[in-house]
């Protein structure tokens, strides 16, 4: 079997089984590892790699944006557990032909992200590479242990909510790949792809609310990430397609190009907003308080159900097939 067929999620399951952890630490399986620090606080640790030609094309993203994004995607994982980002380590594999100016501009973007989120760079590693650039960040955050939220905490009857519009970043990537002129709506989508804006403020606020049960960030698209949350919580879900937050900008760019906005919203990826499940009785009040505090909406898109692995999409109350998101009975 090749790795391609084995699949990332199966490989990670294999790792988790092989490296089961002992004591009060939390290892593989959520957005961050959790290491107790004191009786009340814990460290959160996450790491993410960006590989040239896999995650980005060097001629399509400004080095400043890439530096900014490299930190942003890790901040998103800290936010997803309810923590505040603190310290970062940077490892780079750089091709020998890389312009020094490129590296400096990359660091400029990273530095501005560090400033924005109050993160200090404490170390890293630099090595050569034959042709492709490889970037890895390890980010350490802190959280109040009692408030940390996990993917496994969803309960039957919970409302499923997201903190932002879906599919914009993924469509922005398509705009860039198709070489479309970058202006108006299209430019906004490209910016969503190149400058994700995760919010530890929202994450830690949500984590302090008793009505917030499970939480994770959306990095690989709702269809994929929701399955991970369900698998972890051993639950099912129904999602109401009409309630998925699709911005007017995304709808217009999809219409112009013959793209399916639903497919973009479910599978586009790199949304870097939060996916939360809320106790049904707390939902309306949390939505109101969230809106008042952050100005953005907590979009209620469906509910958690009992049957493990059963993910159903509803349109006007009727079950519909969504081929690119189909996945019942997780294997
Ligand atoms: P995210 O998208 O939130 O960054 P991932 O899907 O990358 O999460 O990873 C899921 C879980 O698997 C995390 O707990 C991560 O630390 C772990 N993981 C992924 N790859 C490896 C690896 N090569 N070795 C050990 N743990 C890994
Ligand atoms: Mg994550």
Image (tube, rainbow, N blue to C red):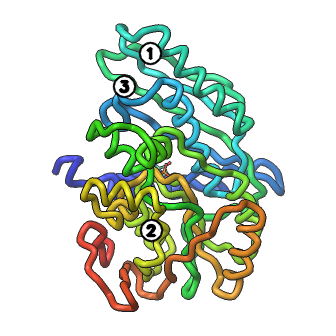
Task: Give me the residue at 65% from left, 28% from top.
Answer: 112
Depth check: 35 or 153 in front? Answer: 153
Q: Quadrant of residue 236?
A: bottom left
Of the two numbered discs 3 and 2 in the rendering, the one whose residue sits closer to the viewer:
3
Instruction: Measure the C-alpha gap from mark 3 to mark 2.
Output: 31 Å
Q: Residues within 10 Å of mark 3 (few under 14, many from 20)?
A: some
Residue ID for mark 3 = 58
Considering depth in this image, is 13 or 102 the residue closer to the camera?
Answer: 102
Question: Looking at the picture, does residue 308 appear above or below residue 51?
Answer: below
Mark 3: which secondary structure? loop
| Residues at discs 3 and 2 in contact (Cβ within 8 Å) | no
Q: Quadrant of the C terminus?
A: bottom left
Tell me whether the residue at label 1 lies in contact with that at label 3, contact meaning CB atoms closer than 8 angstroms.
no
Sequence-wise, which precedes: disc 1 or disc 2?
A: 1
Return the residue at label 1.
Answer: 127
Question: For the residues carrying marks 1 and 2, which lies nearer the camera in this image?
Answer: 2
Q: Nearer the viewer, residue 273 or 90?
A: 273
Q: Nearer the viewer, residue 185 or 42?
A: 185
Which badge, 1 or 3, is on the more N-terminal residue? 3
Q: Position of residue 40 (x, y in %)?
A: 83, 57
Question: Residue 30 — which label?
Answer: none
Please tell me how crowded label 1 is: few (under 14), some (14-19), or many (20+) other residues with Cα within 10 Å: few
Q: Quadrant of residue 139?
A: top right
- Residue at the location (38% across, 58% down)? 252
Determine the image quadrant of residue 152: bottom right
Q: What is the secondary structure assignment of the residue under circle 2?
A: helix
Q: Which residue is mark 2?
A: 226
Percent x, y of residue 224: 38, 63
């Amino acid at each position: 079997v090749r790795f391609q067929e084995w699949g990332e999620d199966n490989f990670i399951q294999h790792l988790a089984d092989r490296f089961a952890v002992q004591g009060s630490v939390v290892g593989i399986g959520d957005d961050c590892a959790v290491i107790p620090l004191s009786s009340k606080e814990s460290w959160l640790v996450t790491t993410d790699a960006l590989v040239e030609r896999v995650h980005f094309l060097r001629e399509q993203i400004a080095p400043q944006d890439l530096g900014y994004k490299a930190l942003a995607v890790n901040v998103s994982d800290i936010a997803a557990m309810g923590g505040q980002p603190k310290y970062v380590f940077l490892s780079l594999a750089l091709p020998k032909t890389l312009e020094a100016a490129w590296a400096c501009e990359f660091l400029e973007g990273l530095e501005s992200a560090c400033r924005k989120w109050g993160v200090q760079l404490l170390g890293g590693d630099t090595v050569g590479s034959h042709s492709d650039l490889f970037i890895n960040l390890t980010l350490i955050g802190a959280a109040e242990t009692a408030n940390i939220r996990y993917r496994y905490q969803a309960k039957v009857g919970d409302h499923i909510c997201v903190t932002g519009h879906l599919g914009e970043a993924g469509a922005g990537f398509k705009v860039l790949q198709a070489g479309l002129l970058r202006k108006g709506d299209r430019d906004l989508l490209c910016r969503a792809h190149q400058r994700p804006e995760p919010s530890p403020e929202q994450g830690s606020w949500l984590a302090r609310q008793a009505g917030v049960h499970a939480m994770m960030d959306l990095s690989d698209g709702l269809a994929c990430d929701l399955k991970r949350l369900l698998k972890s919580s051993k639950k099912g879900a129904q999602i109401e397609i009409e309630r998925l937050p699709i911005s007017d900008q995304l709808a217009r760019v999809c219409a112009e190009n013959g793209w399916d906005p639903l497919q973009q919203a479910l599978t586009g990826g790199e949304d870097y907003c939060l996916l939360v499940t809320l106790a049904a009785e707390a939902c309306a009040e949390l939505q109101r308080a969230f809106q008042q505090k952050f100005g953005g909406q907590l979009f209620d898109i469906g509910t958690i159900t009992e049957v493990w692995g059963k993910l159903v999409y509803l349109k006007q109350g009727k079950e519909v097939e969504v081929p690119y998101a189909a996945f019942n009975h997780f294997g």
